[in-house]
C-alpha cells in the first residue's frame, strides 16, 4: 500500500515537472528578439579630400615654394555695421520762392496802353464831337449821351457838359490840341485830382495798420487782397493776411498762396468757422510779429442778405477791439456799371467805406464809373485792376487815367 502511494506521488511530481517545462518553453518562444543596434550612416567624404584609412588616396605632389614667394592674404576691411533704417517721413513741400513785386510808382503809367484799349472810345468820341464845325444842341446832346453810356452818371455829366459849353463859348477853342487840353482839364477836375488816394496803413499806435476788404461775390475780392499784399510789400511793408472768408472752401488756400509768394503769413481757421474770430486772431498775430499791415479778406456777401451783412458789421466791431480800423476797401466790378452803385450804398450803411477798388476796368468801356461811385459814396477810388497778372493792381492816378481816356 505504501509502495502504491509512493508511486502515485512520483507520477504526480513527474507530471507537474513536465507541465512546468512546457510553460517555460512556450514563454521563451513568445519573447520578442532584442532590437537590432542602429546602423551607422555611411559618410561620404568630398572627393577633393583624401580618405582616412588603408585605402586613402596618395596626395599629389606639388612644387614647393619658398616663404618669400608666398604672399600673405590682404586683411579684409571689416564691413561696417548697417545703420538702422530711419523712419520714413513725409517730405515737406518745398517753400515757394519769394517774389519781388513790381514797384507801384508809375505802375498805372506802365499799364496805360491796357487801359486805353478799352477806354479810348470814350475820349475819342468826345473829341470827335467837340471838333465839329458847329456845336449845336444836337451835338451837345450826343456828348451827354456818350458820357451817360460810359456810366459817368447824370449829375456829373450835366456838370461836365455845362463847363465845356461855357469854356468853348468864351475861349473859342477849336483846334484839336486845344480841345484835348480843355477836355483833359475838365475830366481831371471831375475825377478829383485833389482827393487823398493813399491806402492808410499806419495806425499811429503800437498796433499794425488794419485794412478790411469787403464786397459781393464774384468781384475778385480775394485776388484783390492778394494783389494788395504785393502792392504793400513792394512799398516796403510787412504784411499778415487774415483769411476770414470761411464760407468758400478755396478762399483760404487761394489767399495763402498769394501770401507765400511775397513772404506774408496767412492766419486761417476751419472751413465754416467764425469769421470775426479769425479776423481777431489775424490782428493779434500781426501785433505779436510787429507787422506793418494786417489785411483781412471777408466773405463775399450779397447786399440783399441782411443777416450776412450784419455779420460783416460784427467782424468790424471785433477787429476794433485791438485798435482802430484804418481802411475799409470796397471792391467793385467795373463791368457791372450802375449796379455797383447799389452794392456800394448798402455796404456803406454797414461799414464805413474809406476807399474803393475797381477791378476789371480794362474789360469795359464804362470808365465813368470812377466818377459815379466817388460821387455816390463821397470816398475816392484808391486802386484799380487792369488785368489778371499779379502786379496788375495799380494805385489810381487821375492824370494818368484821363490821359488813357483821351489817348494821344
Image (cartoon, rainbow, N blue to C red):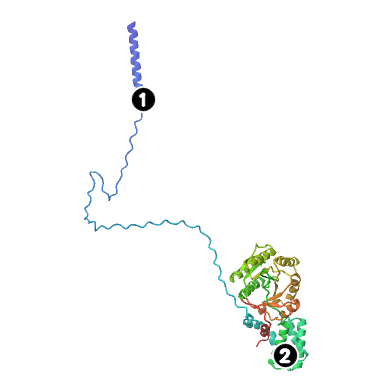
Q: Is residue 1 above or below residue 192?
A: above
Which quarter of the rendered picture does the N terminus lie within?
top left
Give the numbered dot on residue 27.
Answer: 1
For mark 1, give the secondary structure: helix
Cα–Cα gap, marks 2 and 1: 150 Å
Q: Residue at x 62, y 67 (%)?
A: 289
Q: Residue at x 33, y 7 (%)?
A: 4
Q: Give the image location of residue 190, x and y in percent.
A: 73, 83
Q: Give the image location of residue 358, x and y in percent.
A: 68, 76
Q: Nearer the viewer, residue 356 or 287?
A: 287
Q: Residue at x 35, y 23 (%)?
A: 24
Q: Is residue 95 above or below residue 80?
A: below
Give the numbered dot on residue 290.
Answer: none
Q: Nearer the viewer, residue 62 or 69?
A: 69
Whether residue 246 is visible, yes or no, is: no
For mark 2, give the secondary structure: helix
Asked where in the image residue 35 lies, by quadrant, the reply is: top left
Mark 2 nearby-residue class (10 Å; few <14, some 14–19, many ≥20)? many
8 with respect to 198 (left or right): left
Whether residue 283 is visible, yes or no, is: yes
Callout in the foreground (2, 1):
2
Q: Label 2, on which residue?
A: 130
Asked where in the image residue 272 lies, by quadrant, the reply is: bottom right
Looking at the image, is mark 2 or mark 1 earlier in the sequence? 1
Q: Residue at x 74, y 74 (%)?
A: 344
The reply to whether discs 2 and 1 touch (Cβ–Cβ < 8 Å) is no
Q: Which residue of the protein is positioned furthest toward the front in this rendering? A: 205
Q: Give the image location of residue 152, x and y in percent.
A: 73, 81
Amino acid at each position: 500500500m505504501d509502495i502504491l502511494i509512493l508511486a502515485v506521488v512520483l507520477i504526480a511530481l513527474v507530471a507537474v515537472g513536465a507541465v512546468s517545462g512546457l510553460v517555460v518553453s512556450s514563454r521563451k518562444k513568445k519573447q520578442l528578439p532584442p532590437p537590432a543596434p542602429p546602423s551607422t550612416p555611411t559618410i561620404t567624404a568630398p572627393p577633393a579630400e583624401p580618405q582616412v584609412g588603408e585605402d586613402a588616396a596618395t596626395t599629389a605632389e606639388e612644387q614647393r615654394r619658398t616663404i618669400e614667394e608666398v604672399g600673405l592674404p590682404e586683411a579684409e576691411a571689416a564691413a561696417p555695421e548697417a545703420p538702422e533704417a530711419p523712419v520714413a517721413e513725409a517730405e515737406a513741400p518745398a517753400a515757394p520762392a519769394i517774389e519781388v513785386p513790381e514797384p507801384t510808382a508809375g505802375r498805372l503809367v506802365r499799364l496805360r496802353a491796357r487801359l486805353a484799349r478799352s477806354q479810348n472810345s470814350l475820349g475819342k468820341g468826345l473829341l470827335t464831337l467837340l471838333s465839329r464845325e458847329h456845336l449845336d444842341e444836337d451835338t451837345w446832346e450826343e456828348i451827354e449821351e456818350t458820357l451817360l453810356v460810359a456810366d459817368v452818371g447824370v449829375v456829373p455829366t450835366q456838370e461836365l457838359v455845362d463847363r465845356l459849353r461855357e469854356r468853348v463859348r468864351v475861349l473859342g477853342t477849336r483846334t484839336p490840341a486845344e480841345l484835348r487840353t480843355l477836355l483833359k482839364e475838365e475830366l481831371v477836375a471831375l475825377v478829383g485830382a485833389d482827393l487823398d488816394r493813399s491806402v492808410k496803413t499806419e495806425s499811429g499806435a503800437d498796433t499794425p495798420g488794419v485794412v478790411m476788404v469787403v464786397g459781393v461775390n464774384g468781384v475778385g475780392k480775394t485776388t484783390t487782397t492778394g494783389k494788395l499784399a504785393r502792392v504793400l510789400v513792394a512799398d516796403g511793408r510787412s504784411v499778415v493776411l487774415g483769411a476770414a472768408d470761411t464760407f468758400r472752401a478755396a478762399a483760404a488756400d487761394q489767399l495763402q498762396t498769394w501770401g507765400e509768394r511775397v513772404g506774408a503769413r496767412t492766419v486761417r481757421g476751419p472751413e465754416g468757422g467764425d469769421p470775426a474770430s479769425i479776423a481777431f486772431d489775424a490782428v493779434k498775430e500781426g501785433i505779436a510779429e510787429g507787422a506793418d499791415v494786417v489785411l483781412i479778406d471777408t466773405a463775399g456777401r450779397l447786399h440783399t442778405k441782411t443777416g450776412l451783412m450784419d455779420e460783416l458789421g460784427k467782424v468790424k466791431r471785433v477787429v476794433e477791439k485791438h485798435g482802430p480800423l484804418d481802411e475799409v476797401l470796397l471792391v467793385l466790378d467795373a463791368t457791372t456799371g450802375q449796379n455797383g452803385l447799389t452794392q456800394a450804398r448798402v455796404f456803406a450803411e454797414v461799414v464805413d467805406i474809406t476807399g474803393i477798388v475797381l477791378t476789371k476796368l480794362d474789360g469795359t468801356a464804362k470808365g465813368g464809373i470812377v466818377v459815379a461811385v466817388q460821387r455816390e459814396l463821397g470816398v475816392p477810388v484808391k486802386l484799380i485792376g487792369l488785368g489778371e497778372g499779379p502786379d496788375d493792381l495799380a494805385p489810381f492816378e487821375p492824370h494818368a487815367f484821363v490821359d488813357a481816356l483821351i489817348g494821344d
